[in-house]
Amino acid sequence: MSEAVYSTETLKEAHAQPYRSLEGKVNPSFLKALDKMGYEYMTPVQHKVLTALPSYSSDCLVQAKTGTGKTIAFLLPALHALLEKKTVPKGQVGILVISPTRELALQIAKECDEITACLPTPIQCHTAFGGTARASNLKKFLNGNPTVLVATPGRLNDYLGEEEVRHKFQNIRTVILDEADTMLEAGFLQDIKKVLRQLPPKKNGWQGMCFSATVPDKVKDVISVVLNPGYTHLTTIDKSEPPTVDRVPQFSIIVPAAKDVFNALYALVKLEHAQNPKDFKTIIFGTTANGVALLAAMFEVAMPELKIYQLHSRLTQNVRTRTTNDFKAASAGLMFASDVIGRGMDFPNVGLVIQLGLPASGEQYVHRVGRTARAGNEGRAIIILTQNESYFTNTNRQLPIKPYTTDLTPSIASAAPVVERAFVSVDESVKGKAYQAWLGFHKTLMKNLRMDVGGLVQTANDYAEAMGCPEPPMVDKKVVGKMGLKGVRGLNVGTVTRDAPPGGGQRGGRPAANGRGGGGIGGGPRRGARAGETDPRPQFGSSEGGNGGNGRGRGGARGGARGGPKRRGGAGGVDLDGRVSKRPNAL
Ligand SMILES: Nc1ncnc2c1ncn2[C@@H]1O[C@H](COP(=O)(O)OP(=O)(O)OP(=O)(O)O)[C@@H](O)[C@H]1O
């Protein structure tokens, strides 16, 4: 099949093989569970894995488009082989699934629970990720029978630091990397290697399974950390097809400058909503967590007719989980998100994905687009870029992006007063954090953006002006130093204290030459902000891994997570919160 059509109806029409045809090959309890889940036919990737894999214990690299049912495609053979071989004693982990994000880990665990629900003896599936109570989860894990563990790398490494935990992996039989290209990328690779060092060696015979929608060549170079040479490579992607969700119409809107993005986004959402007022379920991806929080805050005021959601690493894990579940169940709403849900997450019936600003890569763009048009449904995708950022479409010519068909110019002009008014209600500290995150994110892209530091700061200040800041928000001098922006004209440098978040600034903080007549104390902090609402730490120089839930940083601190390794390896970059870290921008 060349098209990704995967609802039961369309699968039937496409003459997909029914799960029934696997009777005698797959444990009947799984077939019963699949039937209960409403999965009558195999999607192409499920069919391929279940019929073309030499054995259900074979090492494999599997590539299939987003939203085509890869989760079942790895769980089913691994679980079947686990039950058949019976080599994993009670209390030991048999299958380890490693996922890049907390939300995805939860989603996989839920699917595992469903598929094992009809077994005569239930199987326990545990999760381990940051931002959750470590001690009680670990106790449950150690005292329970976690036959399957779904984990994010940071918390997993944290667990594996304990002798008792390592003991539970002595009979491991399958290690699965979901979103394998991300897991084997520079940022995560060190974590994965560290995990593998704590597990029994590969020569003991455990199976490795790597699944992803995108598999760049650089990943194939390091795949040997989990797969034996001679592994089976299965793909349902036709080589002649563009490597993307080709049946999703994709459009771009190029606006002149950073100051125009808010008006353009508002005008676009207004227009798209008017065209589809019923069941308008849309995800809007921003570049940094704090940038996303800003958009959500503005839209809450500007568009009260829509239910607004937000998901990013600056929220507690409880809030993240609740919001994930709410948005999954919602029939309509506007979700503002960072890449914490850029991959793998299955939100039913999302009809539109909007990306505001540059994705980390062409692959990440594809994964974000893949949040729509899932399981056979329709969907569209739109990316808004500034003129400076428009190189993205030129350097990713394989992506089928066409110019947006409606001229938004008049709507953008009429959006301006609404957006301006809405920003009046947005807290200055939210603006300040978004400004700082913007600087951090774009600093790493200066070469591509063809900007020097002066131009970068000027553009950031235009962005601040567009959000209604009377002058550039204050940035802590330590942060300015870490960003390598010391002495750059136009910055409002000061001392940001515990009570004064970025954008606020301590009274009496040293005003800097901001090129706008000084002043220095930009948009003071909201007085009496509750503890925990502001970030006492300078926002650069630490590596949180807020996306991956690696057990450290904000979510971890609040949820009682213990610190994992201090940093990830790899090329320097800015994490999803716009903070400089040692790892690249991708998840
Ligand atoms: N055999 C099937 N029949 C009908 N629906 C299915 C089937 N298998 C999976 N689905 C549904 O398809 C959707 C996508 O599945 P899944 O999340 O596993 O896709 P994926 O390929 O892992 O996506 P991504 O690349 O984004 O991670 C889910 O809603 C899932 O419930």
Image (spheres, grey):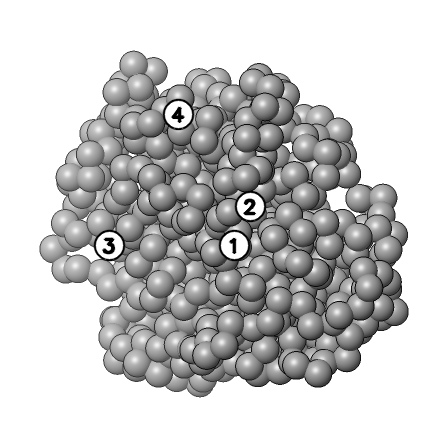
Mark 2 or mark 3, whichever is nearer to me: 2
What's the CA distance linking mark 3 and mark 1? 47 Å
The quarter of the picture where residue 8 lies is: top left
* Label 3: which secondary element: helix
Of the numbered discs 3 and 1, the one sitting upstream in the chain is: 3
Residue 502 position within the rendered picture, expressed as x and y whole percent measured from the top left: 62, 70
Marker disc for residue 424: 1
What's the CA distance linking mark 2 and mark 3? 48 Å
Q: Is residue 40 above or below residue 437?
A: above
Q: What residue would you read off at disc 3?
A: 113
Q: Is residue 122 above or below residue 233?
A: below
Residue 92 position within the rendered picture, expressed as x and y whole percent measured from the top left: 32, 71
Q: What residue would you read off at disc 4?
A: 274
Marker disc for residue 437: none
* Label 1: which secondary element: helix
Neighbour class for label 2 at 10 Å: few (<14), some, many (≥20)? some
Residues under numbered marks 2 and 3 in contact, where contact means CB atoms less than 8 Å apart: no
Residues under numbered marks 2 and 1 in contact, where contact means CB atoms less than 8 Å apart: yes
> Residue at 27% of width from left, 42% of height from top?
330
Residues under numbered marks 2 and 4 in contact, where contact means CB atoms less than 8 Å apart: no
- Split into 4 quadrants, where in the image is the N terminus? top left
Mark 1 or mark 4, whichever is nearer to me: 1
What's the CA distance linking mark 2 and mark 4? 21 Å
Of the numbered discs 1 and 4, the one sitting upstream in the chain is: 4
Question: Which residue type does callout 2 highlight?
Answer: Glu
Q: Is residue 532 above or below residue 82?
A: below
Question: Which residue type does callout 4 highlight?
Answer: Ala
Q: What residue would you read off at disc 2?
A: 420
Q: Is residue 347 above or below residue 520?
A: above
Q: Is residue 57 left or right of residue 89?
A: right
Of the numbered discs 2 and 3, the one sitting upstream in the chain is: 3
Residue 484 vs residue 126, the one in the foreground: 484
